[in-house]
């Protein structure tokens, strides 16, 4: 929310260009912008996103934040317990973590591990995750990252663990 005196607001130039924010365009007289606040609404409004956000908030509210947090903590505990059985698996990050597990499997590049996991129906993010200083700190070129949220299941964690064990078995 921005509070500005109307005369200042009307004098402010838009910072983006797009449909619905322009009143007129002329080669001889240039561009005339719509009155504020419409001059700052470049392009088509993200109506679907707005409606989707409302539905998502209703859905989360119907479950309850405490119930979601409790479930996600249980799932993380289960995942860490099961991942401990994977040979040569290195976990990165704090012991008390929320929703994300960063890891590498032996000396195998994260991209290779991610590709193998994809064949097992497991989606992980691979790469430096926009955190190159962190990769330098851990002295690795990349990591795999699994995210666990309220709609994941213990069966999906089991699939991740089985996939990692199979990769270790195949590649050593």
Image (tube, rainbow, N blue to C red):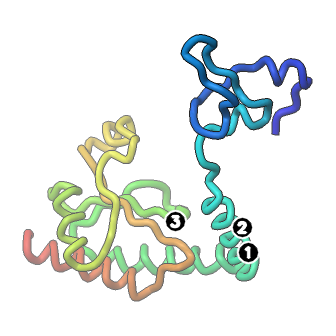
Quadrant of the frame with the C terminus: bottom left
Residue 14: x and y in percent read 67, 25
* Residue 9 in view in this figure: yes
Mark 1–mark 2 CB contact (< 8 Å): yes
Secondary structure of the residue carrying numbered label 2: helix
Q: Residue furthest bottom?
A: 155
**For the residues marked 2 and 3, what is the alpha-carbon distance in whole angstroms?**
23 Å
The residue at 40%/88% (across/down) is: 155
Q: Could you give the CA–CA distance between mark 1 and mark 2, rounded to whole angstroms?
A: 6 Å
Residue 54 is marked as: 2
- The residue beneath circle 3 is 99
Q: Position of residue 61 (x, y in %)?
A: 75, 75
Using the rendered image of the protein, determine whether residue 85 is visible from the camera's viewpoint: no
Find residue 58 and name its label: 1
Instruction: Select label 3 or label 1 by which is in front.
Output: 1
Q: Residue furthest top?
A: 28
> Tag on residue 71?
none
Within 10 Å of disc 1 (Cα), the crowding (few <14, some 14-19, many 20+) is few
Q: Earlier in the sequence, mark 3 or mark 1?
A: 1
Mark nearer the viewer, 2 or 3: 2
Q: Is residue 160 left or right of residue 168?
A: right
Q: Locate residue 12, reporting x and y percent.
A: 75, 20
Residue found at x 44% / y 54% = 93
Q: Residue at x 18, y 61 (%)?
A: 106
Q: Is residue 28 above or below residue 141?
A: above
Q: Nearer the viewer, residue 63 or 19?
A: 19
Q: How far, Cα to Cα, is label 3 from label 1?
A: 21 Å
């Amino acid at each position: 929310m921005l509070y500005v005196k109307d005369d200042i607001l009307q004098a402010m130039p838009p910072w983006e260009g797009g449909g619905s924010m322009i009143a007129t365009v002329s080669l001889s007289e240039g561009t005339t912008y719509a009155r504020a606040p419409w001059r700052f609404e470049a392009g088509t409004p993200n109506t679907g996103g707005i409606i989707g956000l409302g539905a998502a908030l209703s859905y989360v509210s119907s479950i309850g934040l405490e119930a979601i947090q409790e479930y996600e903590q249980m799932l993380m505990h289960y995942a860490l317990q099961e991942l401990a059985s994977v040979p040569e698996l290195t976990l990165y990050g704090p012991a008390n973590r929320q929703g994300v597990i960063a890891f590498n499997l032996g000396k195998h590049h994260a991209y290779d591990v991610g590709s193998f996991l994809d064949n097992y129906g497991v989606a992980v993010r691979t790469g430096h995750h926009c955190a190159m200083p962190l990769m330098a700190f851990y002295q690795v070129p990349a990591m795999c990252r699994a995210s666990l949220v309220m709609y994941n299941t213990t069966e999906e964690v089991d699939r991740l663990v089985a996939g990692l064990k199979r990769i270790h078995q195949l590649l050593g």
